């Protein structure tokens, strides 16, 4: 082997060894340049890469000042962009014997002539798949052509550069797969876990953590398809990356993101960031012409000195859980009281789950009265829980458990089955009734099988579904895709059932819902009824609702009637239906059956028009 060949072989072996050992690309390229300069005295080496935007990115030029690398960084390649930019553009070697006069260097000579460089030989770096990924160059301090031995050195070095750059691409790709989410391009759960552990282990001040959950992603996937869901996730990730520049925003789950806020000394800073995130989500996402709300809910926590990463994450999780239950589409910061509230909620949920398993969730019924005659026009089924000690408690005492969608769904299933059996028993006994109203939840609509569940349950019991009135609140509209909710309501009505909007006027229902959704009955909240005989405004509102409902072809039911004066006033306004403790408290099925027999289909006795026949009987 000749001496030059031996040197080239030694150079190649050394560089390949350092690539195999994992030396950084920059260090490896600098080592290659220095060894090549030693093998060809008088030359100056440089290595440049080209990025996806076809811009030059300097990798190594150890014998040139840093200002040279800074000057060429970001220059677009092209047909007349010096030696390297042109070689990459053409995909072939470029020889320039006199930089001062060669047109390839026009406008760029000031970069190299002051450095004493007058000629160059540039070889494109070609990857195994044929891509041009950069260029390796020899610069000369004299004009003229490279010698044959120098050409061989350049060929060998360009080949080594290709190996090193491809090795770095594989390493970078593996790093991205290990630490970045492929859909959103944000750091992933692994990267987040490493970062929060490092920050909590070596804090430079208080650390803020926000957990962000996409609202109703499952509904989008179920109704519009997973492609639409992926488009929603990707767009939300993009918006988070844009609004949170300078912070570590990660995708840590299917519908969950996390944001680390270093040196977070005030709660106000977290609140401002949360507000910016929520504002960025205002425009809808529109994949393939579909309009999807980019709604998110945020829970945040701040770690004091000594707080470990597990505690910080747990606190942020509690805040997010609370936000999803009480302020969906908003932001909640962790407070110590949340922990005790969460423990209470867990205890109540466990108690309700046990009651469901033991069959201790039962319906009680409250009559709905024709105010003019005193007859029972229908009944509402209300969930009650029989505790292990036999005490009956109202839904208000286990309301927290209903915030869990699975529990709410199970309670509706239990209530549907029990109500259908009670209705079947009344029918078998010859008890006449018009309808039974039952409140359902957003969880029932999100599941997508509400109509089928009702029809199956009532068919098994032998009861026509037309006797059921399905009551909903605005939470149903907020908890799902609007079109899906409307379709379910249309399907309920198509099978003969009526739909009632409950708690109207509490701020949980608005006039727009009367236009957008098929509603048959409006139930005026007890807060208006309670003030009707003492407040002129309440009276005006109730009268207006009565007029509006009549014109829209809807019925009105007044809730929470407790006095004769309220009943008279409502009757004078034209409100024909109501319910409340004036007539009867919710009672078991046996009792309501007796009341239906006595007052359900009978005309009120003369002189009893304003009496309370149901209450007297109960």
Image: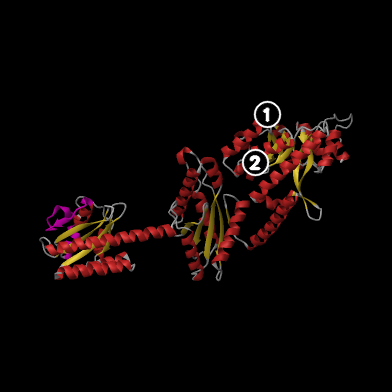
> Against 495, is 162 above or below?
below
Q: Is residue 274 something that shows in the picture? A: yes
Q: Is residue 53 left or right of residue 473?
A: left
Does the segment drawn in magenta span residue 92?
A: yes
Q: Which mark is residue 553?
A: 1
Residue at the left extreme of this rendering: 144
Which corner quadrant of the image does residue 118 belong to? bottom left
Residue ID for mark 2? 509
Please name the colour scheme applied to the rendered image: secondary structure
Residue drawn 50% across the image and 52% down it = 277
Q: Quadrant of the C terminus?
A: top right
Expressed as whole percent of the image width and height from the top left, the position of residue 348 reads: 71, 56
Determine the CA span between mark 2 and mark 1.
Answer: 18 Å
Q: Position of residue 428 (x, y in %)?
A: 81, 34
- Quadrant that contains the N terminus: bottom left
| Residue at the spot 85% in from the left edge and 37% down from the top edge | 594
Disc marking residue 196: none
Mark 2: secondary structure: loop
Q: Mark 2 touching mark 1, by CB under 8 A?
A: no
Does residue 70 appear anywhere in the picture? Answer: no
State the extent of the magenta-drawn residues as a range.
Answer: 89-115
Quadrant for residue 40, please give it: bottom left
Say left or right for 533 vs 328: right
């Amino acid at each position: 082997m000749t001496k030059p060949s031996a040197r080239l072989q030694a150079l190649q072996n050394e560089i390949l060894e350092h690539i195999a050992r994992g030396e950084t690309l920059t260090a490896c390229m600098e080592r290659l340049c220095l060894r090549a300069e030693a093998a060809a005295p008088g030359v100056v080496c440089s290595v440049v890469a080209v990025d996806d935007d076809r811009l030059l990115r300097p990798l190594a030029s150890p014998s040139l000042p840093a200002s040279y690398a800074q000057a060429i960084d970001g220059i677009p390649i092209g047909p007349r962009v010096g030696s390297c930019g042109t070689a990459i553009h053409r995909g072939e070697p470029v020889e320039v014997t006199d930089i001062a006069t060669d047109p390839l260097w026009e406008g760029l000579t000031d970069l190299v002539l002051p450095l004493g460089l007058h000629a160059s030989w540039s070889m494109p770096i070609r990857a195994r798949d044929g891509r041009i990924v950069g260029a390796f160059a020899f610069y000369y301090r004299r004009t003229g052509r490279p010698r044959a031995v120098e050409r061989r050195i350049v060929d060998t070095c360009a080949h080594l550069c290709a190996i090193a750059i491809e090795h770095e691409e594989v390493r970078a790709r593996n790093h991205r797969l290990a630490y970045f989410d492929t859909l959103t391009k944000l750091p992933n759960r692994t990267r987040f876990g490493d970062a929060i552990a490092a920050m909590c282990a070596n804090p430079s001040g208080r650390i803020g953590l926000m957990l962000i959950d996409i609202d109703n992603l499952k509904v989008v996937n179920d109704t519009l398809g997973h492609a639409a869901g992926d488009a929603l996730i990707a767009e939300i990730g993009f918006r988070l990356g844009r609004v949170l520049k300078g912070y570590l925003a990660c995708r840590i789950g299917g519908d969950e993101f996390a944001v680390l806020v270093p040196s977070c000394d005030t709660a106000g800073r977290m609140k401002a960031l949360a507000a910016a995130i929520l504002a960025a989500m205002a425009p809808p996402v529109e994949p393939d012409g579909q309009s999807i709300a980019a709604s998110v809910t945020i829970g945040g926590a701040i770690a004091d000195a000594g707080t470990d990463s597990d505690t910080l994450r747990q606190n942020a999780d509690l805040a997010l859980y609370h936000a999803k239950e009480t302020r969906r589409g908003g932001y909640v910061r962790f407070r110590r009281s949340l922990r005790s509230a969460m423990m209470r909620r867990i205890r109540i949920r466990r108690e309700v789950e046990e009651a469901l398993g033991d069959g201790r969730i039962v319906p009680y019924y409250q009559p709905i009265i024709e105010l003019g005659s005193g007859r029972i026009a229908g009944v509402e089924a209300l969930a009650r829980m029989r505790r292990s000690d036999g005490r009956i408690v109202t839904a208000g005492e286990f309301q927290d458990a209903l915030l869990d969608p699975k529990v709410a769904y199970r309670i509706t299933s239990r209530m549907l089955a029990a109500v259908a059996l009670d209705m079947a028993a009344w029918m078998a006994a010859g008890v006449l009734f018009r309808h039974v109203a039952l409140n359902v939840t957003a969880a029932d609509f999100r599941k997508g099988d509400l109509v089928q569940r009702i029809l199956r349950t009532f068919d098994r019991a032998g009861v026509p579904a037309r006797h059921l009135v399905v009551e909903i609140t605005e939470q149903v509209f907020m908890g799902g895709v609007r079109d899906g909710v409307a379709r379910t309501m249309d399907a309920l009505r198509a099978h003969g059932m009526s739909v009632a909007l409950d708690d109207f006027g509490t701020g949980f229902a608005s006039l727009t819902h009367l236009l957008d959704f098929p509603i048959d009955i409006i139930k005026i909240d007890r807060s208006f009824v309670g003030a009707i005989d003492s407040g002129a405004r309440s009276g005006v509102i109730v009268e207006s609702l009565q007029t509006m409902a009549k014109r829209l072809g809807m019925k009105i039911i007044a809730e929470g009637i407790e006095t004769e004066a309220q009943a008279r006033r409502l009757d004078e306004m034209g409100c024909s239906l109501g319910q409340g403790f004036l007539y009867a408290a919710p009672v078991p099925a046996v009792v309501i059956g007796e009341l239906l027999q006595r007052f359900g289909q009978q005309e009120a006795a003369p002189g009893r028009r304003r009496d309370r026949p149901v209450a007297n009987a109960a």
